[in-house]
Image (spheres, rainbow, N blue to C red):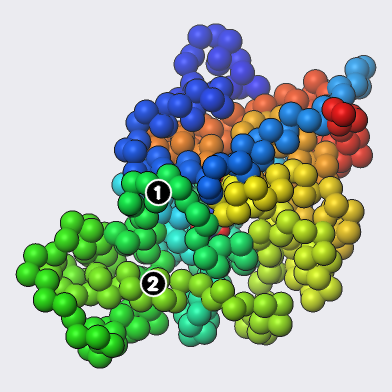
Amino acid sequence: SRIYREGLFGRRPVVPVAPRALEEAARRKLSARAWAYLAGGAGQQRTDVANRAAFDEAPIVPRMLVDVSTRDLSVELFGRRLPAPVLLAPIGALELAHPRADVELAEGVRELGLPVVISSQGSTPMEDTAAALGDCPRWFQLYWSSNDDLVESFVRRAEAIGSDALVVTLDTHTLGWRTMDLDLGSLPFTRAEGLAQYISDPVFRQLVEDRVAHPLVPPEPTPRPTRAALAAALSMARHWPGPVRSNLRSPLPRAAVETFLEVFSRPSLTWSDLGRLRDRTRLPILLKGIQAAEDAVRAVEIGVDGIVVSNHGGRQVDGAIASLHALPPIVERAAGRVPVLFDSGIRSGSDIYKALALGADAVLVGRPWVHGLALQGGAGARAVLEHLLAELDLTMALSGVRTVDEIRERGLGRRRP
Ligand code: FNR
């Protein structure tokens, strides 16, 4: 309500409130290359579009004459009370949005107390991000590496920084068909963007050093480093003192990118591997990227602690089911057994309301706060989240519900035929 009052009394918001205007402002500010990676969906962007369109179908049916003078947005998740059922989705390569990347974000949003899901593809070492978060809750998102020692190391580090949960992302063992990036010939990772988690890891560094010492093929003579190699070296120099800093022609940057491409994921991962993770950590484990009810059932059966219904913001399979359409059948089979979280397509507080009404226990928000970060740094990201929470609160009040449980009990009206 503070935000609303300030708006009414002529104070301009830090970043645009209207979702389209926010997106448009970020697009104007960012380079074509950064925009392609941050905003782009897979293929013809059909799933990205469908994710948002799905929110238009089922209506909220507001009820009148309910005492809504006090509302409570808080929820409990994995033993912790959260101020609202909203988390910051893990987003990699944030240096494309802001030079201080994850640390800038963390400093900006920590006072909100919403859990920040730190990405495997983070742009600052998770220890730095965690320090910047102070007391704010953090979770860690894991891409399951093909190298077991690296998985182990990431899990240990995630525990050491006080993560409340581990989110294993399943839908990106291989990068999707990102047409906008492909047309620009610019995938971030080839310039070591989004590699800080790896480069700051002792297991990973050893793999790179072994590779340089024992190259599979003799290194090509490269009298002048390519622009991409220089950019990679500069980006690495922050986290890898010594050889890289002192010699930008060092073979390390290239070896690091090659090593990353090798160990980034394990496309052969199957259900039977998950038990090994269970043995390695006592943190709650959530599976992110679940879209089929059958997979949700399987996840519950093998004993995971939560599910994130997600299609990665439409960035992986073009033509995949809209995430909001995937939610109800999963809720039907899994809700009450484990928490069901939701993401992909949320752009407003009203969208959050709808996902909760369809049974999500909490939602993750992705691109909107990235746009805020690009426009006004940490304060911009914070403003975006405040706008979402303020609209959620207002939507609850005007719809005649006081709590998140009441949103769920109320549900939505009938879908448009
Ligand atoms: C992502 N996402 C993602 N997910 C993940 O598990 N690890 C990651 O490193 C990333 N990186 C990433 C980068 C960028 C630029 C985007 C846009 C997305 C997916 C993310 O966590 C989330 O699922 C989607 O962003 C949700 O969709 P919306 O809210 O962006 O529509």
Up/down of 281 relative to 405, above or below:
below
Q: Secondary structure at mark 2?
A: helix
User: Which residue type carries mark 2?
Assistant: Phe
Q: Is residue 357 left or right of residue 191?
A: right
Q: Residues within 10 Å of mark 2 (few under 14, many from 20)?
A: many
In the depicted view, which residue is nearer to us: 162 or 60? 60
| Res 88 seen here | no
| Mark 2 vs mark 1: in front | 1
Q: Residue at x 59, y 78 (%)?
A: 268
Give the residue pinned by disc 2. Answer: 260
Relative to residue 324, is residue 328 drawn left or right?
Answer: right
Q: Residues within 10 Å of mark 1 (few under 14, many from 20)?
A: many
User: Of marks 2 and 1, which one's residue comes earlier in the chain?
Assistant: 1
Compared to residue 303, the image places residue 94 above or below, namely: above
Relative horizontal placement of residue 344, taking residue 69 as reference (left or right): left
Using residue 159 as the reference point, say whether residue 377 is left or right of it: left
Judging by the rendered image, the residue that carries numbered circle 1 is 181
Kindly identify the residue that appears in the image at 19 percent across and 75 percent down.
251
Q: Callout 1, which amino acid?
A: Asp
Q: Position of residue 123 (x, y in %)?
A: 39, 57
On the image, the x and y values in percent for residue 180 come to 43, 44
- Kindly tell me whether mark 1's CB lies below 8 Å from ligand 1: no
Q: Residue at x 16, y 77 (%)?
A: 220
Which residue is at a point 50% across and 80% down the rendered structure image? 146
Q: Pointers 2 and 1 in contact (CB under 8 A)?
A: no
Within 8 Å of ligand 1, the CB of disc 2?
no
Picture quarter with the C terminus: top right
Instruction: Give the SS element for disc 1.
Output: helix
Report the front residue among 320 and 344.
320
Residue 122, located in which quarter of the rendered image?
bottom left
Is residue 259 positioned above or below 372 on the image? below
